[in-house]
Image (cartoon, grey):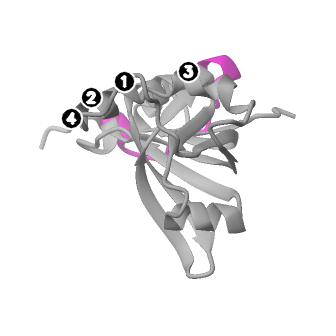
């Protein structure tokens, strides 16, 4: 029987990408998707919530209703994990990230929010919901600066690299 991707057979390579190439691949994935699953933990246990995200470099962000379960969990424990993945067709197309960091919540009047807000593309939501474009959302902005990222891309095996790569904000 012919094998479509023979380079997937056998043990996975262990070679690491250099930091610049790994960052390019991570940013490419973050730029080509818009949905993630954020995992939080609270009094009722773990909660994995699909949300639409935006990113600014390695910071992922989204708006949320202040009283939502994920926001209650973030208030109790800001440590989160976020999963982003490209649609999977087969093992060769497997590509995604696990982001680990601490969620920070910014109210509309918080001066730190101004750094991130231009990357949030809220206008399309307003058009879809027949809302005025001169009235930006007032929901809290949640920002997760990536502290650690696990990047998975099985296509890397084809070039002799490990399919799972590791990135840290502080490379030391």
Query: What residue sits right under mark 1 in the picture?
Result: 133
Left/right placement of residue 54 relative to residue 128 reads right
Query: What residue sits right under mark 2 in the picture?
Result: 127
Q: Within 10 Å of the Cα at label 4, are there few (<14), some (14-19), or many (20+) other Cα atoms?
A: few
Q: Can I make out residue 65 in this image? A: yes
Query: What residue sits right under mark 4 in the picture?
Result: 4
As displayed, is residue 44 above or below residue 82? below
Residue ranking furthest to the bottom: 44
Numbered disc in front, either 2 or 4:
2
Residue 109 lies in quadrant: top right
Instruction: Find the magenta span and give its range.
Output: 6-21
- Is 91 magenta? The answer is no
Residue 17 lies in quadrant: top right
Query: What residue sits right under mark 3 in the picture?
Result: 118
| Distance (Cα) linking label 1 and label 3 | 14 Å
- Quarter of the image with the N terminus is top left
Q: Can I make out residue 13 in this image? A: no
The secondary structure type at the circle numbered 1 is loop
């Amino acid at each position: 029987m012919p094998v479509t991707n023979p380079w997937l057979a056998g043990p996975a390579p262990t070679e690491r990408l250099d930091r610049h190439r790994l960052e390019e691949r991570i940013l490419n994935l973050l730029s080509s998707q818009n949905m993630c699953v954020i995992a939080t933990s609270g009094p009722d246990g773990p909660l994995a919530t699909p949300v639409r995200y935006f990113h600014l470099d390695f910071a992922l962000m989204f708006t949320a209703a202040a009283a939502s379960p994920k926001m209650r969990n973030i208030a109790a424990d800001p440590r989160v994990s976020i999963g982003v993945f490209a649609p999977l067709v087969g093992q060769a197309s497997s590509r995604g990230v696990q982001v680990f960091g601490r969620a920070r919540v910014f109210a509309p009047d918080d001066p730190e929010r101004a750094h991130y807000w231009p990357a949030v593309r809220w206008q399309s939501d307003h058009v879809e919901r027949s809302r005025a474009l001169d009235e930006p959302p007032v929901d809290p902005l949640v920002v997760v600066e990536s502290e650690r990222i696990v990047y998975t891309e099985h296509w890397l095996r084809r070039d002799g690299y490990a399919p799972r790569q590791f990135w840290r904000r502080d490379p030391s």
